[in-house]
Amino acid sequence: MKRNSFYRKINKCRICLNSNLFEYLDLGSQPLANSFLNKSEIKNEKKFPLKMNLCKKCGLSQLSISINPENIFNEYDYLSSSSKALVNHYNQLTLFLSQKYKLQSSELILDIGCNDGILLNQYNRKFNNLLGVEPSSASKFIKNKNIKVINKFFNYKLSNLIKQKYGIPKIITITNVFAHIDDIKNFVRGLSNISNSETIIIIEFPYLIDMIKKNYYDLIYHEHLSYLSLKPLKYLFSLYDLNIFDYKKLNIGASGPSLRIFVSKKYSKYKISKKIDKQIIYENKWGISKLSKYNNFKKNVNDHKIIFNKLIDNLINKNYNVGCFSAPAKGNTFLNFIKIKSKKIKYVSENNNQKIGKFTPGSHYRIITDEEFVKKNIDYAILLSWNYKKFFIKNSLFSKIGKGFIIPFPKPIIFKLNE
Ligand SMILES: [Zn+2]
């Protein structure tokens, strides 16, 4: 296959079309973060540039390339429901929406990028008009008969079909999806097309400012095309008759701390909170369009790599066995950037059956079950799903016998367990 059919280079901002983009971070050539490998696939693994660009005009950070989604979703091992913490998070969201907006059981509720049904499954059983859109094979895992599924990418064209066949949704949720969309304008045009003055669109995504401030560079991987904040989004929605009317900061999301925004038609009944413009003023002051802010981030990323490698070397020199705990996509950006020599890491423990028995992309560590992991005499485990650290410290088998978790972000520390 020709190389250029795998990805296209991004020459202009996907929101404001400005062609003057500035590269500020290069994480090297990396494989797709969700493509866990069978042993026979290791030798043919493909890698792609992982670089970040800034559009100074609207403040959008974006990858320098866009991988053809067919290549990403053909080999997709991410099942949301494998994360108990995430199930709980979406349960809270559906409860909140049901109460706050007094949802009726027959109203159409749409979840775009519904994965294995994790969010829609949380609605009370009485809801009988649930619709999910999911292009990946994850949709095969939806067992709830109440959920109708469209196995396609959402776009303007699909929005027409949804409108004709199912009508206008009262609620549209889009969690951990927005950053993945290349033609985001077409997508938002589609959202506007299936919204009326009653519709509420709820979108969750990792917040760019948190990522930069806390040095969460492991959020950067090929599936995440855009790194979002309120300023460019307000502009994007305004192009299609939509408004952000509220937002909330969240401590948890599929990739860590997130922003939840509430969007409606411009003429809707939902009042626009003053918080929105206040936060945009803050984003401007903070330096969302200033390259110096991002150059500083680059320095912090490189420092993190040095500090982390020293910490690991120190443990290895003391003859401790080191492994990795959990195998999220973001862990692969991190592992492939810091480049720990593969023989230093023994195994990766994971509870998702889709990944067990496979090898991590790029770093090629073998993935085993938690039960196997505790038999391997691992002393310290790098917790790659650091955003769920409370959960793993409390619930994992390794917590009972290991010496400690190495928490890589925001600053690498060792959380002592049993010594
Ligand atoms: Zn722009």
Image: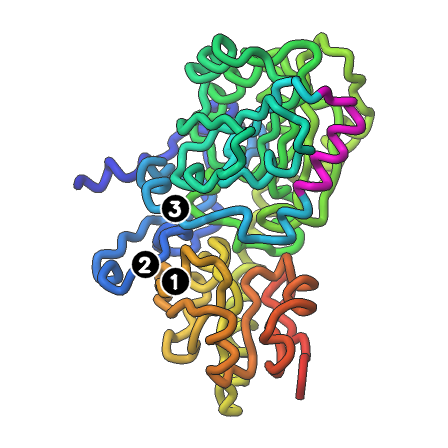
- In the displayed structure, does residue 323 sit left or right of residue 200? left
Q: Amino acid at mark 3?
A: Tyr
* Residue 54 seen in the figure: no
**Disc ID at residue 110:** none
Q: Residue at x 43, y 52 (%)?
A: 26
Percent across and percent down for residue 345 are: 43, 76
Q: Main secondary structure of the magenta part?
A: helix
Label 3–label 2 contact, CB within 8 A: no
Pointer 3 or 2: first along the chain: 2
Label 1–label 2 contact, CB within 8 A: yes
Percent across and percent down for residue 410 are: 64, 61
The residue identified by callout 2 is: 37
Circle 1 SS class = loop
Q: Amino acid at mark 2?
A: Leu
Disc 1: residue Cβ within 8 A of ligand 1's nearest atom: no
- In the displayed structure, does residue 73 sit left or right of residue 376? left
Q: Is residue 28 above or below residue 98?
A: below
The residue identified by callout 1 is: 360
Magenta stretch contains residue 101: yes
Q: Residue at x 43, y 69 (%)?
A: 368
Q: Amino acid at mark 1?
A: Thr
* Residue 365 seen in the figure: yes
- Which label sits in the foreground, 1 or 3? 3
